[in-house]
Amino acid sequence: MSNPRIYDLKANELYPGFLIKEVNKSLGYYVKKYKESPDILKEAIKYSVENSGKRFRPILCLLTAKSLGKDYRAVLPTACAIEFIHTYSLIHDDLPSIDNDDLRRGKPTCHKKFGEDIAVLAGDALFAEAFNIIIKYQIADDRTKIKILEEIADASGASGMAAGQIVDVYFTGKKISKKKLEYMHRNKTGKIITASVRCAAILCGVIDDYLKKFTEYSENLGLAFQITDDILDVTSYKRIAGKTIGKDAIQKKNTFPNIWGISKSKEIARDKIDKAIAVIKSMDIDYKWLVNIANFLLVRKV
Amino acid sequence: MSNPRIYDLKANELYPGFLIKEVNKSLGYYVKKYKESPDILKEAIKYSVENSGKRFRPILCLLTAKSLGKDYRAVLPTACAIEFIHTYSLIHDDLPSIDNDDLRRGKPTCHKKFGEDIAVLAGDALFAEAFNIIIKYQIADDRTKIKILEEIADASGASGMAAGQIVDVYFTGKKISKKKLEYMHRNKTGKIITASVRCAAILCGVIDDYLKKFTEYSENLGLAFQITDDILDVTSYKRIAGKTIGKDAIQKKNTFPNIWGISKSKEIARDKIDKAIAVIKSMDIDYKWLVNIANFLLVRKV
């Protein structure tokens, strides 16, 4: 089986391959910013950020701007800042004391390559620099910029990603309720995915009802993303995923397949995607890209 | 020998004991904000933030505002945000893969109390929430607020605290140059101390030459702070310091006493304090508190 081309939905006028290149170019620009930093930190940042993934979150951010008829470049710095946060969260997530992963996207994880101490601190640096990218490079009026920074802080902090991660590690090996499982996923993965959409929408001037609809779209998308991630951990192959597969079961993680079974999990993911698509289609925007990226989640192999 | 009262310089009209109480009250308010967060995260945040230290950075922030004739409450949220960042950095610093410390202020470190995974993530959450405190609670116009957030991001990121920490861990066991040692200290400890002063000054409307003078004051102060910290690690007692003493030598850390000897290190610290005091006395402000807190560094026991 060949490695599937991600988002290759050219037939539907979507060609995010171009956008991925744009994101990578822009990320490459930011990682070269730290000229005064210690070499090992620069290397760890570059290595981790450039270890090319799907760029799902920044692409989602860019597509949201496109759906509103805006140039994707209007939100590119924020898209890159969100990828910085995603990268930092993966570095910490992979640490021996958390998920203890040796492989990430087919390459040694940051701590395997640079040592655990450097990995903790490189993650910390990336988090700070995510805020810096928005502060220094995102063009927006001051009020809007503060709103974006607040979205990012909320999505990653004690009521966001960190909260979801804590539930994940704390309840590993202990069975949790379906409600708690959803709380965990909504926070661990969902909040940053929601921020990717909301930040782009806010930067494009969206408020009130439409912002609510974008939020509803992205919350369903975020949950579907994590459910399909859980499913892939059971069904995928190391060669394709580029990371250790089947670890959730070995580590006794609370996952959707674990609690609901694979078949029901797929059904829930399909339902979330249907809801996401229904809400986005109810809006007077150019929604095709956001429909496509939602459908992509159900067929993704990595 | 009794535990010395910190900043107890009442004779000089300074009574920061009151300010410490105000900072602690305010920190206590913020740590109660995370009602929706997982219990273990709330506990880890509360435990780490309330494990009362000197509150050197927030007090410095408040005293800067006082020196400019402003009410300390005008900068209190930012002072608390800086203490959140300091707390997060200590949690990560104490981790087994970094300094491997069991004690902090006389109590088990966060990872000893809650586990290493929770400690990494609680630190991450505190960092995000530091930004949130400024965004949500600091009263300032939008432009000024963004400047403050930038000061914080710069001071803690890849050209600030994280950079200094990386040099520290990377060169542990290897001898470094005096220049590199100073770079390490200026970044690891200095930048956040400088941010404590600069943020208060910016919030009080200080610009140009006066901001430069405040920066020079705080840079000297920050370096003196770390030098005296290094000296205390050699000369203090566990009972007073509330942390493991003599670890720098055991871990073969690069420190001022290590590279310069104790006597010369004390001389350098004195020189930095003299410079800090000279610059602050050259300003048309109510400088006595900032002079006192500088002098305090040379006599501190913890």
Image: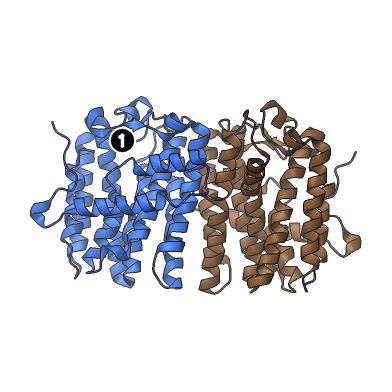
Chain colours: A brown, B blue
Tell me where residue A104 appears, x and y as whole percent: 69, 38
SS for callout 1 = loop
- Left or right position of B300 against A242: left
The C terminus of chain B: image quadrant: top left
The residue sitting at 23% across, 64% down in the picture is B66
Q: In this rendered view, identify the residue nearer to me: A245 or A133.
A: A245
The residue sitting at 29% across, 37% down in the picture is B230
Tell me where residue A203 appears, x and y as whole percent: 62, 70
Reading the image, the residue beneath label 1 is B105
Give residue A230's quadrant in the image: top right
The N terminus of chain B: image quadrant: top left
Tell me where residue B83 appears, x and y as whole percent: 36, 50
The residue sitting at 68% across, 45% down in the picture is A51
Q: How busy is the neighbourhood of tag 1: few (under 14 within 10 Å), some, or many (20 plus)?
A: some
Give residue A231's quadrant in the image: top right
The residue sitting at 42% across, 54% down in the picture is B155
| Residue A270 seen in the figure | yes
User: Which amino acid type is marked by label 1?
Assistant: Arg
Q: For the image shown, how many numbered marks are present on the structure? A: 1
Q: In this rendered view, identify the residue nearer to me: A300 or A228.
A: A228
Q: Chain of mark 1?
A: B
Tell me where residue A15 appears, x and y as whole percent: 83, 61
